[in-house]
Image (tube, rainbow, N blue to C red):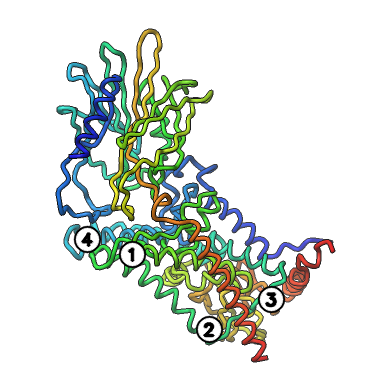
Amino acid sequence: MKYLIIAFVFSLSLQAQGYINWQPPVKKAHKGASKEHNGHAPRKAKQLQLNNSNPNTTSEAFYIMPTLEKHELVLKDGLISLPRTGMANYHALVVNQTDANGIKSSVRYIYGHGRPSKISPTKITQMKKSDLEIAPSPLPREHDRYKGSNSYKFELHFKNRTLANTKVELSTTNGSKETFKSDEDGEFKVTMPNDFKEVKKGRRANRPAEFILKASHLQDGITYTTTFAMPYHVNPSDYWQSKEFALIILFIGLIIGIFMFRNINKKKKRKA
Amino acid sequence: MKKFLTLTWFRRLVQLFFFVIMVYGSLFMTTFYSEDKFTQALPALSCAYDKQSADYCSLIPLQHQMDHLVSGAFTGSVSLMQALLPTLITLGTFVILMVILNKAFCGWVCPLGFFQEMIHAIGDKLGFKRFHTLSISTLKKVRPIKWLMLAFLVFIFPLLTGLGFLGHEMGDPFCKVCPSRILTTLAVGDTSQLYIDNSTTGYMTLSIIADLLFGLMIAMALTIKQPFCRICPMLALQAVFKKVGLLRLVKNGSSSCDNCGMCAKVCPTDIVEIQEVADKPTNITYSDCTLCGACVEFCPDDNVLQLQYAGYPLFKSSKEYFKKRNKDQRGWEKTTWADVAPK
């Protein structure tokens, strides 16, 4: 119930600002549901919801494979089922909408499992998908993901060129809000807020939250708006991982190694 | 003074070249994430946790495949073909690379092997007394460890995790304790892999072992040659396929070998069996061999030891080379930083 309310409030705040964005549909948590993950085994088709979409406008939604192939998608009641591509690496889910208020877009990247794509995800983030676009530079690599307290670089693109000195707003489903500004090269750095509450120990014990980056740009009387949404996770270093203890253990290892060397040396001397 | 380029120095340059590629490769070779890398089946410890590497070792996909796919064949959640095909592809690619370079991946490519050799060189210069060989009794205890590491940490524990008998932390237990994970991430300025994880007893135990092992490896490498390589499961996995490699260490059946033991003394993994006299040309690429060629360099007899590629000698022992190499080595061992430091 709590998640339903948060998602509802979050989407209302976006609607008020005329932004559209991709988000996982909110499902009621089942009590006693299995927490075991099924690794890289086949999964159910993923669904995503387009929030604040105007039903009276034409939406162009497409899915870009890691090989940069483009597949048209059909929105049904703002919901989309992602096709199974059987391909590893990042896929891009894109929507472009034009209405009386201007041109809106939203991009979300989804990691897939399967055969290697042989193409760097940098190419998918750099290719033009919308007129105004927030591009991660780069996306978190395998074995990594967006985490609280860590900093990540993004670029703001407008019609294939970087867009300088433009305001970008960050908001999260945990309630944080912050504003950034792109520099001369269109780049900006975001430090993910550590705004998780009631954090439990363990990577799987905590649900990820969603962050949204929003930007708008006025050109020739047309307002362009875009969002970039992805999940972000609790940073283990903030809660259940310690670097200080690691350094102590490493130092103990060094001492034990030196003692072992001294013992072997003594034994050799005795034998001699 | 005329400089003498030894095989060891040439190997160091090759190691340095591969260290840069393995650890920082994606920065200049391709773009970020390195176009899915060259292969995910490299027979050397190039770590997938390093966000700037250009490749990664076969041990991580093998553990994941045991955990997520091969276990599925036992439970019936995936077909036998689906379960085994990725593992066969990984091993198939591994075998192709083994055919090309055989166990030289350890001695010429592995970033962790290069790191340990550099630490050993620093130990030399700091004046630490080096151990030329470990005792036979110690070797007998140490040698089986790599096979146990391969069997349990790469295959059995991940498989049992996939079957639900062990906790998720045992899904990739070798990576959790591998010093290369800590080394290569620290080398790119990423401290995220140096931690003690207190979320569960299992994670805590594995993280303590990893950090302890990393410290132990550095301290021991100051005096002992290649301490971690001796227990590395990659060495064991390579040993399984060593017969298919085109690069080999060959001992010629020759009466000129006087069993002086120099080859065994300089061997970084203490393969004492190299000094045994052979009656006919014999492939002596033992399980612990990293094909570094040190034994060939320090063999004082003509043509007794050879590094051969597809039957053609690439480098062979000779009296003349030995004299120069031995002089070079004595010069290296004689001078420590204490000798050259301003007083």
Q: Closer to us: mark 2 or mark 1?
A: 1
For mark 3, name the chain.
B
Q: What residue type is labelled 4?
A: Gly
Marks 3 & 4 on one chain: yes
Which mark is on residue B72? 4
Q: Which amino acid does label 2 sit on?
A: Thr
Disc 3 marks which residue?
A: B129
Disc 2 marks which residue?
A: B138
Q: In this view, does B4 lie to the left or right of B241?
A: right
Marks 2 & 3 on one chain: yes
Q: Which amino acid does label 1 sit on?
A: Met
For mark 4, name the chain.
B
**Tags 2 and 3 in contact by the CB under 8 Å rule?**
no
Disc 4 element: helix
Residues at marks 1 and 4, CA–CA distance in whole angstroms: 16 Å
Q: Residue at x 57, y 78 (%)?
A: A260
Quarter the C terminus of chain B occupies: bottom right
- The answer to which of marks 3 and 4 sits earlier in the sequence is 4
Q: Which amino acid does label 3 sit on?
A: Lys
Which mark is on residue B170? 1
Q: In this view, does B275 lie to the left or right of B5?
A: left
- The answer to which of marks 2 and 4 sits earlier in the sequence is 4
Q: Is residue B8 left or right of residue B4?
A: left
Quarter the N terminus of chain B occupies: bottom right
Residue B42 visible in the shown view:
yes
